[in-house]
Amino acid sequence: MTSRNKPIEQATPLSVGFVLLNRFTLLPFAAFVDCLRLAADEGDRSRQLRCSWTFMSSSGNEATSSCGAVISPCEALKNPEHFDYIVVIGGVQDEKDKTDHRALDDIRLAAQFGTPLVGLCTGVFALIQAGVMKGQSSAKKLKW
């Protein structure tokens, strides 16, 4: 795979930011990041050579999944211009009073910058709530 249409030898690593929402769902997160881990290096050494990723929460504190597993460390939400993609991992939907307005603002900012957004599990609902899905086709083609 190449990044930004450059040969692998010259390509800058793909950069992915993960926004972990309140009580995010662990399985979609783990599956996605593990695919990146395997693609980022050779020989199962887990080095972030061809791809790097950053785990973020609104507070910059650890993020707790819906099953209680904790991801630490997390960074505070970063400028979306730092990333090629931002992946939003949604959480439990019955906690409307815990809407992460700061994360929704960051998602809107990413959309304004043109940073591609990925919603995993209920992360799609966060994209809808942020208002960035209006006019989007469900069959939008990926550009590699």
Image: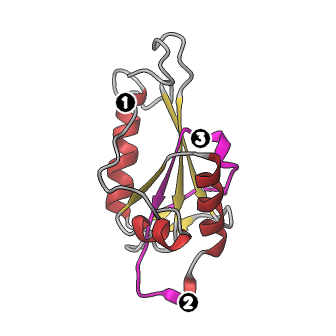
* Quarter occupied by residue 90: bottom left
Query: Which residue is under mark 1?
Result: 39
Residue 73 visible? The answer is no
Q: Residues within 10 Å of mark 2 (few under 14, many from 20)?
A: few
> Which residue occupies 61% across, 66% down?
103
Q: Considering the image in quadrants, where does the N terminus appear?
A: top left
Q: Is residue 40 magenta?
A: no
Above-or-below relation of 98 to 133: below
Instruction: Residue type at mark 3: give it.
Output: Phe
**CA–CA distance between discs 1 and 3?**
17 Å
Looking at this view, is 109 or 37 the one in front? 109
Please provide percent x and percent y for residue 45: 40, 27
Asked whether the viewer can see residue 2, the reply is yes
Mark 2 lies on residue: 97
In the displayed structure, would residue 138 be above or below residue 101?
above
Tell me where the magenta segment starts and ends, as one range: 71-96
